Every structure is written in structure tokens, then in C-alpha cells.
Amino acid sequence: MRVLIIKTSSMGDVIHSLPALTDAMLMLTNTRFDWVVEEDFSEIPSWHPAVYKVIPVAIRRWRKNWFSYQVRKERERFRNELQLNKYDVIIDAQGLIKSAWLITRLAQGIRHGGDFLSVKESLSSLIYDKRHLIKKKQHAVQRIRVLFSKSLNYLLPTTYADYSISHCFSKSHNKDTNQYLVFLHSTTRTSKHWPEHNWRELITSIHNNGLHIKLPWGADHERQRAKRLAQGFNYVEILPKLSLEKLASILVNARAIVSVDTGLSHLASALNRPNITLYGPTNHKLIGINGYNQIALCSSDKKMGTLTTNIVKNALEKVIT
């Protein structure tokens, strides 16, 4: 059987889909899974043992110059690659109009997705051949597991969610292993940031623990924040700009991770690393971290500043001692 998965973005959403694929891989034999995903996140599906082919798409980039010659040629190449195979089942796990109308309708096969009440954008359900009721008041990981089980007609496993990617990132055996923390300090929305003075207070509190701290970054403004956080601390390292794969290798060997609500926090969760995630406006019970060794600290009034340094410090000390 050939199955096409459509889950294009964001990083957290793509990672949330991995346990459903693990379920399908274990429940179904002789099944080939291809995955359509945004180009920025194309590394992630490739880590899963069930994925045969990753088909990158670039809707985020294309829509800036949709009718330019270059973009039209790229869209044509994507359409041709998508239509190389006829699929037995196409699962649109994105539930958006862009995924349903720009991708799902182009692929050849029986299209599955959530019904009118279950998807993020109700009109997207009109393109599906098979529509499934997926209860909304459950975590996104479980929702996608339910969608896969209904689309592929197997009994939903009762096992804990298994992301099946940690095997790609072996534990190192050098002296640095487990001797550092990673602070994921950057996220897209300002309302999800933890104040810089709190980060610096937390860094100060680590001084006597014999651990050093690694600060990753993606964009230049994040690098500038990392510089401000590291200033004056000789046990804080600003990492170079890294690919997702190299950053995952850093995360998997960390003693623990402290993060704001960002895609990389979900990656830490998928790698089963001890991870403390700080939440403001996000409903973490529906779309937050989901996995072993995960601690969610939530601001009571949705302002990140109400999560004091002592609250985070106390949680971190319990993890690293």
C-alpha cells in the first residue's frame, strides 16, 4: 500500500505527526509512506524509519512571488513529482485550505481528512473523499493518531506516543556529554518570550553547578539576544548557526533543556530529553510538549514575566540533580 502524508508546517505540527506514523508503521506491513512538507522542515520526516520519500513544498516562500517565472517553474516541478505515483490513501493532516486545495487535490488517490467540524479551516474538508470526526478537545498528537487510524482502518494503539527519531542521534561518549544545558530562548511571537533579565538570572544561578550552557539561534536578531544573554559569563557558549540535524545532536546529549514555546521545544520532546518549557498564551494541553521527561510551566496571567526565575530554577534543579 502507498500512503501520502500531507503535513507541511510548522515545526511543532510536523513533529506532532510522527507518533501517528509510528502507529501506522507498526500496525501495517508492506506500506510505503511519502510525506509532503515545507522545505524548511524537510529533515524531520526523513529521520523516521517509515518514510520512504520526502517531497518538499515551498508555499511559504512561493506566495511572496506566486506568479514569478521562477516560482511557476518550481510549482510545476512539485506538481510533477507529486503526481509520479498513484496513492492508495492520501492523509491531509494539516486541515487547511492551502493544504487541501493546493496539494491534496493534485495528488492521485483517495483523500482523507477531518470532517467539517474537525479541521482547522472547515472549507478544506470539502476536497476530501473520506471525512473523519476527530474530537478537538485532545492533544494534537492524539488527534493525528486518531486521524491516521481512521484513514488507514486500524485499531488505535493505547501505547504512549512514540516519535521514533531518537535513534538517528546517538548519545556521544565524550567528556562533554550530559555536562551542559541548552537554553532555547527564541520564538516567533513576542508574547511567548521570557524576559532577558530572567534568562540572565537563571544563567547566574547555574554558576556553581559545574555545567555550561549552550545558546542556539536561527536569525540574526536571535543571535543578538544570545550575545546579550551570554555577556559576562564564561560558561555560556553561543552556538554557530546549525542545521536541524546538528541541533538535534546537541539536544540529545544535553543534561536538560529550558525553552520557550518554540518548535525546537517539540524537537526536544521527541528526543525524550528532560525539557522545561515556559508557556504564556499557548494552551499547552492541546498543542504543547508531549512526551517523556517534559515539564510545562505556565504563566497564570499569560504574561511570561509572571514566571519568576525562582520557579524555573527550582524546576531545573530537580531535573539536573
Image: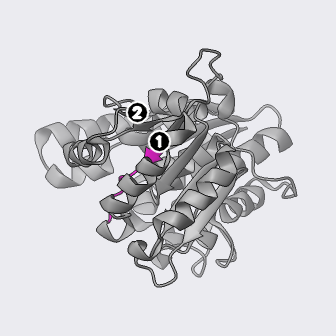
- Location of mark 2 (residue): 235
Residue 149 appears in the picture as rendered: yes
In the rendered image, residue 300, in percent from the top left (x then y), is placed at 52, 82
Image position of 248 (left or right of 239): right
Circle 2/circle 1 CB separation < 8 Å = yes
Depth check: 216 or 96 in front?
216
Q: Give the residues in magenta.
A: 183-189
Amino acid at dot 1: His
Residue 112 appears in the picture as rendered: no
In the rendered image, residue 256, in percent from the top left (x then y), is placed at 59, 43
- Magenta portion: prevailing SS class: loop
Residue 113 vs 23, above or below: the answer is below
Task: Name the image quarter holding residue 197.
Answer: bottom left
Residue 144 vs 179, above or below: the answer is below
Q: Which residue occupies 74% across, 43% down?
A: 22
- Location of mark 1 (residue): 207
Q: Residue furthest top?
A: 174
Dot 2: within a 10 Å radius of its alpha carbon, few (fewer than 14), some, or many (20 or more) residues?
Answer: some
> Does 188 lie within the magenta span?
yes
* Gap in angstroms between the C-alphas marked 2 and 1: 8 Å
Q: Residue furthest bottom?
A: 301
The answer to which of marks 2 and 1 sits earlier in the sequence is 1
Kind of element beneath mark 1: helix
Image position of 74 (left or right of 266): left
Residue 95 vs 214, above or below: the answer is below
Q: Which residue occupies 71% across, 63% down?
A: 142
In the rendered image, residue 136, in percent from the top left (x then y), is placed at 64, 77
Amino acid at dot 2: Tyr
